[in-house]
Image (spheres, helix red, strand yellow):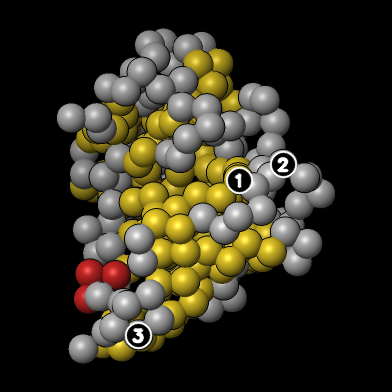
Amino acid sequence: AQTVTQSQPEMSVQEAETVTLSCTYDTSESDYYLFWYKQPPSRQMILVIRQEAYKQQNATENRFSVNFQKAAKSFSLKISDSQLGDAAMYFCAYRIPGTDSWGKLQFGAGTQVVVTP
Amino acid sequence: EAQVTQNPRYLITVTGKKLTVTCSQNMNHEYMSWYRQDPGLGLRQIYYSMNVEVTDKGDVPEGYKVSRKEKRNFPLILESPSPNQTSLYFCASSLRGKGYTFGSGTRLTVV
């Protein structure tokens, strides 16, 4: 069963504008980690941002920020002041809780971000 | 430079011919994983390892084998590849509490 859902296959944004990518997940756990990864055409997977569920404060990394709504099981990514270099596939990922399962990430299907001049 | 090194980057093979994709990390990470990426499905975990000699199945382990004899290496073995294993494969490593570092990917085509 799909644990992580990204409902937007593709999003288009103009340079300097803001785009928000949605991600929802299914869990009965209270402590977990969430991640956003970027995959440009080079296909390299790049960690953009991570959020620990026990932290109420939303994570930010420069122009990237998240809106973490724990009760709604929602983890959206906002890209501000979009640049051409932001064009990529973005994946949301959920780390399955458990002492021995740190390595188990489940990914969503991805959202392709297109940036237009 | 801290990195995960995967080889080869591209591989075309024939059905049934055993192959190995190598993965090595130089960061002394405990955790290593293999994923396959297919359009519309995102990345799905094949196997992961918590440390030397400790491995576990992921979501799609059928047709794959792994081993973790040394902490730095985690090869992926396809004993008898089939066309449905044509995919983009990623190796990744991590420390507990941190995000994963991914390799550059291996594009495998099985004909």
Q: Residue at x 68, y 60 (%)?
A: A25
Residue picked out by circle 1: A52
Give the crowd class for mark 3: few <14, some 14-19, many >=20 residues within 10 Å: few
Q: Amino acid at mark 2?
A: Asp
For disc 3, the chain is A
Q: Toward which corner of the image does residue A108 lie, by quadrant?
A: bottom right
Give the crowd class for mark 1: few <14, some 14-19, many >=20 residues within 10 Å: some
Q: Please tell me whether mark 3 sits on a helix, a strand or a loop.
A: loop
Q: Are marks 1 and 3 in contact (CB under 8 Å)?
A: no
Residue picked out by circle 3: A17
For disc 2, the chain is A
In this view of the protein, which residue sits in the foreground, B71 or A30?
A: A30
Residue found farthest to the front: A57
Residue found farthest to the right: A28
Residue A74: image x %, image y %? Answer: 66, 65
Mark 1 or mark 2, which is nearer the start of the sequence? 2
Residue B75: image x %, image y %? Answer: 36, 26
Residue picked out by circle 2: A31
Q: Please tell me whether mark 2 sits on a helix, a strand or a loop.
A: loop
Q: Toward which corner of the image does residue A90 lie, by quadrant?
A: bottom left
Measured in 3D between alpha carbons, the distance from the residue under mark 1 to the one under mark 3, in whole angstroms, is 27 Å
Check the image and report above or below for B56 versus A90. above
Task: State whether discs 2 and 1 lie on one chain.
Answer: yes
Check the image and report above or below for B89 versus A41. above
Q: Are marks 2 and 1 in contact (CB under 8 Å)?
A: yes
Q: Amino acid at mark 1?
A: Glu
Measured in 3D between alpha carbons, the distance from the residue under mark 3 to the one under mark 2, in whole angstroms, is 33 Å
Check the image and report above or below for B36 versus B96. below
Residue A42: image x %, image y %? Answer: 22, 58
Q: Amino acid at mark 3?
A: Glu
Q: Residue at x 36, y 66 (%)?
A: A63
